[in-house]
Image (cartoon, rainbow, N blue to C red):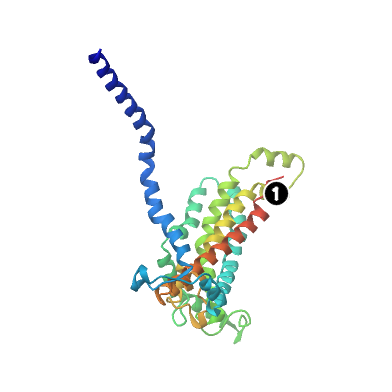
Amino acid sequence: MTTMTRPLNAARRKNFWLRKGNKIAPYLYVSPFFIIFGAFGLFPLLFSLYLSFHYWEPAAGLASMEWVGVENYVFALEDEWFQSSIYNTFIIALKSGIPQHAVALPLAYFIHTSFTRMRNTVIGIYFVPYITSTVAISLVFTTLFSRDYGMINQVLTSLGNFTIADIKVLAWLFPTENVDWSRPAYTKDMISFVVFWRFVGWNTVLYLSALQTIPKDLYEAATIDGANRYQQFWHITLPMLKPMAFFAVTLTIIGNLQLFEEPFIITGGTGGIEQAGKTAAMHMYITAFVESDFGTASAISWILFMIIACLTWLNSKLLGGRND
């Protein structure tokens, strides 16, 4: 009896651990992702929130953290430089974001309706700026906008000095002398143009992918009913593009309000003359790594997060509704 029960108990224990292992194995396979996400994603996020309520000098170690409550938030909101950076961020976001979609949508419609064989080539050409290094793009445009030897100034002044019978016929439209694009009046426009040039191709690809999912039967039925191309675009294309428009505009809001690389490189990391090109992300970086005020920098990051969340919610109300 004893010799029979021992193998039976061993088999039961083996089956028990096999069943246990089969249940645990899937979690072991996915555990590396959660470990990495927790260490490099979730922990920094929660620590920055905790840090935003403290004054901390990193050089003195974690022991130097001092609880200050919401003082960092109050200080950031009352800081004139932060207010200026928020203003610059919104202006650049509007000047670069609105033209992105105003150009990308009709451009995508034109490519969709006019190109067949070479469509992928055309899309690739427009998409190249998006995958190009931001540093390279910013350096190239910094050279193009140079006051003394930039190509943009050369073209504009050539047009402004174009003469017919010793009369500068285009002087009223184009400058006759080189423009200093680093002046505060032009800094935001220069940064906005670079951001627009980089992301217009990305939005074009998004809208083009959505256009390819619209059933052709809708256009055929509209044609039979006598609708022209403008009416088809207004009553069929735009409503069907609403979900993609919501997605694209949301990405633009998030990206433009966190703008850092382009203004940082173009202005040499200073924000330009009178801080005209300093964005909120740049101000946060300078507060943390130049002024070593990590508590205020963390508070700025969460203020920026709340602004982005509010604008995303507003965008969902405008474009995120169901199509009728």
> Residue at the front extreme?
2
* Residue under the point 62% across and 79% down: 173
User: In the rendering, at what x and y percent does residue 102 appear?
Assistant: 62, 60
Q: Residue furthest top?
A: 1
Give coordinates of residue 104: x percent, y percent.
58, 57
Given the current orientation, which residue lies at the most extreme left position? 3
Measuring from the top left, give residue 244's x and y in whole percent. Answer: 60, 50
Secondary structure category for the residue under label 1? helix
x%, y% of residue 268?
Answer: 42, 76
Q: Looking at the image, which residue is at 38% across and 54% down?
A: 39
**Could you tell whether 171 is left or right of 259 in the image?**
right
For image coordinates 40% across by 51% down, the residue present is 37
Res. 149 visible in picture: yes
Compared across the picture, whether 278 is left or right of 317 comes to left
Q: Would you place residue 92 above or below residue 158 in this image?
A: above
Say if residue 196 shows up in the picture. Answer: no
Q: Name the one closer to the observer, 167 or 43.
A: 43
Type of the residue with mark 1: Arg
Residue occupied by mark 1: 229
> Is residue 96 left or right of 6 when viewed as pictured?
right
**Viewer-proximal residue among 121 and 201:** 201
How many numbered circles are shown?
1
The C terminus: image quadrant: top right
Q: Quarter of the image holding residue 74?
A: bottom right
Q: Nearer the viewer, residue 264 or 286?
A: 286
Identify the residue at the far bottom of this view: 166
Q: Quadrant of the N terminus?
A: top left
Alpha-carbon neighbours of circle 1 within 10 Å: few (<14), some, or many (≥20)?
Answer: few
